[in-house]
Image: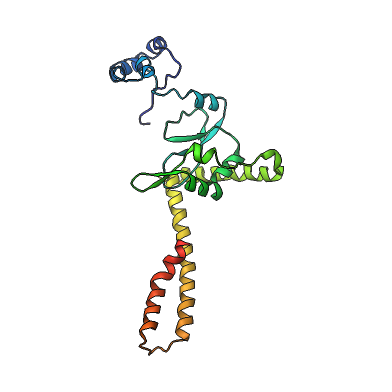
Amino acid sequence: MGRLPLDFHAKTEAFVRDQFPEAYQHLLENSKPIRAEDKMPYRRENWWRFGQPSTEMRAALKGLPFFFGTTETAAHRIFSSLDGSAAPDQKIRVIACSDWAIFAILCSRLHVEFSFRTGGWQGKGNDPVYQHTNTFNQFPFPDFTEVDSSLVDELRAKGRDLDRFRKAQIGANPGLTLTDMYNALEAFRLAEHYEKARSFQIRIERSTSARTSPYSSNTTTRSTSWLLRHTAGPTYLAL
């Protein structure tokens, strides 16, 4: 199962010592000496708890059967549904909501592109960073009370179907991750763009060939042909 965190949020030291003696002893030996030197009073005095209590997030998630989240920094902006009992760490941006219509909007190209333009960039690969202040808080989510109910129902159905499909694929293919799926999707998109660019290039080559003698030694003609072969594809991809 791997490593699991010891989450004793809002629990007293006496409770942890009496109910979970082994965990208490582990924290006493490994956490308390480090926390004793921490400059923050909360961390020093509550050495058996997480460094940040995340009280507001816990309150927002309380009672939700599931919620949505996305990795703060990632090459692809992917949103997932998480079980309501999960306690995300600081690297997960949490949306305290169980409405699949909101999930569909979060996963839409419109919102993803908006996040790329308003968020930050970080890391070796200059990966996009999802920011709740500049991105989520600024995004114009629709007021569903002002939208046709059939459209909202359609969004909910599509959002739920997307989540089920992705989880089914991961379950049927051991080792497959969401990142793998979106890497493949991006590769297909690039391949599609390349084929379109190639068709344009072929038409341009045919058009120029029809107007140029195959035996011409004109320098301008040769240069134009070379330029088309080397730039038609990449230029189209950049668009």
Dividing the picture into quadrants, the one containing residue 147 is top right
Residue 9 rendering spot, x and y as whole percentages:
44, 19
Q: Is residue 75 above or below residue 238?
A: above
Q: Is residue 174 visible?
A: no
Q: Residue at x 51, y 47 (%)?
A: 112
The N terminus - image quarter: top left
Q: Where residue 5 sits in the image (x, y, percent)? A: 38, 26
For image coordinates 42% across by 22% down, the residue present is: 7
Query: Toward which corner of the image does residue 30 lie, by quadrant?
Result: top left
Residue 142 placement (x, y as % from top left): 64, 42
What residue is drawn where x is 54% and y is 27%?
60
Relative height, residue 75 to residue 222 (above, below):
above
Q: Is residue 45 above or below residue 181?
A: above
Left or right placement of residue 168 versus residue 218 in this view: right
Please indicate, yes or no, whether residue 125 appears anywhere in the rendered image.
yes
The x and y percentages for residue 12 are 42, 12
